[in-house]
Amino acid sequence: MRRAAHDANATIGAAELAQRSGLPVRLLLRFRERGVIEPVDDAGATFPFRAAASARALAQLWRAGWSEARIARAWRIARTVVADPDEALHGLLASVGRRRLTVRTADGRLLEPGGQQVFDFAPAHAGAEVAALRTPEEWFACGVAAEASGRLDEAVRSYERALADGSVAAHFNLGNCYHAQRRRRDAQAQFEATVALAPDYAEAWNNLGVVRGSRGDRAGAISALQRAVGLVPHYADAHYNLAEALAAVGEVEGARGHWRAYLTYDPNSRWAERARRRLRVRGGAEG
């Protein structure tokens, strides 16, 4: 079985997380110290893979001109109306370009500090006019909140509307949602759009390889996964996926090398024993 990059059990190092989100490492670590983004280890050097979405939200706020202190302060205020820390952070994207702090909730409401709702759109029967009253950034924030809550249909609609500004993150997240819905052709199109806009996005190359493989394009899968490990040599999931793809076309020795690499970078995951079994079955016991 292959894994897409948003596997719930996957982790990511601070340097790689910073690279993928576009945040300087020093700034990412300061947000960690403020508690805005949480590591999984005592050393504070490893984060859950799901933190990539939060790091990208931080990067969006920072690129919009918000200082570290302003982001941290606004996040603390946002948590008074939205308890979930990640949802509160994504909800802050609704404040970009506004004079007053507002927070977009998972159900699409726009709240001010204190919990007062801001009615920023017309009744639902207004159709396309309603969609136009939210910015692509706001639709992206709605999509993130809906995806985090498992409301995939709503997340898809929001991300589709967020594509208007050519957002790399919107293409990538929409691809993940399509993949979860088994809309593999649509997912492939979104991951291909992602890497066209951001050729160094290893996570997107990995997911593109997964989708191509699921659609029977073995050569395309191998090519994409090779690109992923070329960009990030310590990308454990991509090594595992590439090993599986190579094994499927009979390139056993190449596959063995990538299973070994996977075990080097992620030896204790629930997938590690699978990799060890693959190595034993193909001759030569591995630890």
Image (tube, rainbow, N blue to C red):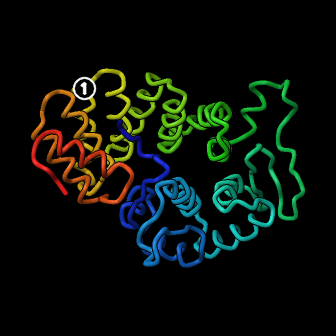
Task: State the residue at coordinates (87%, 59%).
Answer: 115
Could you tell me which quadrant the N terminus lies in?
top left
Instruction: Estimate the x, y position of residue 177 in percent, counting from the top left.
Output: 54, 35
Task: State the residue at coordinates (49%, 37%).
Answer: 176
Task: State the residue at coordinates (85%, 24%).
Answer: 125
Which element is circle 1 on? helix
For residue 279, say whether it is visible: yes
Q: How many marks?
A: 1
Q: Nearer the viewer, residue 198 or 287?
A: 287
Q: Which residue is mark 1?
A: 218
Instruction: Estimate the x, y position of residue 229 in percent, counting from the top left.
Output: 24, 48
Looking at the picture, does residue 207 appear above or below residue 248? below
Q: Quadrant of residue 129?
A: top right
Task: State the residue at coordinates (76%, 69%).
Answer: 77
Instruction: Estimate the x, y position of residue 193 in percent, counting from the top left.
Output: 41, 33
Residue type marked 1: Arg
Could you tell me which quadrant the C terminus lies in?
bottom left
12 to the left or right of 52:
left
35 to the left or right of 80:
left
Q: Nearer the viewer, residue 20 or 6?
A: 6
For residue 96, say whether it is visible: no
218 to the left or right of 157:
left
Looking at the picture, does residue 114 appear above or below residue 286? below
Q: Nearer the viewer, residue 256 or 29?
A: 256
Q: Residues within 10 Å of mark 1 (few under 14, many from 20)?
A: some
277 to the left or right of 171:
left
Instruction: Estimate the x, y position of residue 191 in percent, counting from the top left.
Output: 41, 34
Q: Quadrant of residue 155?
A: top right
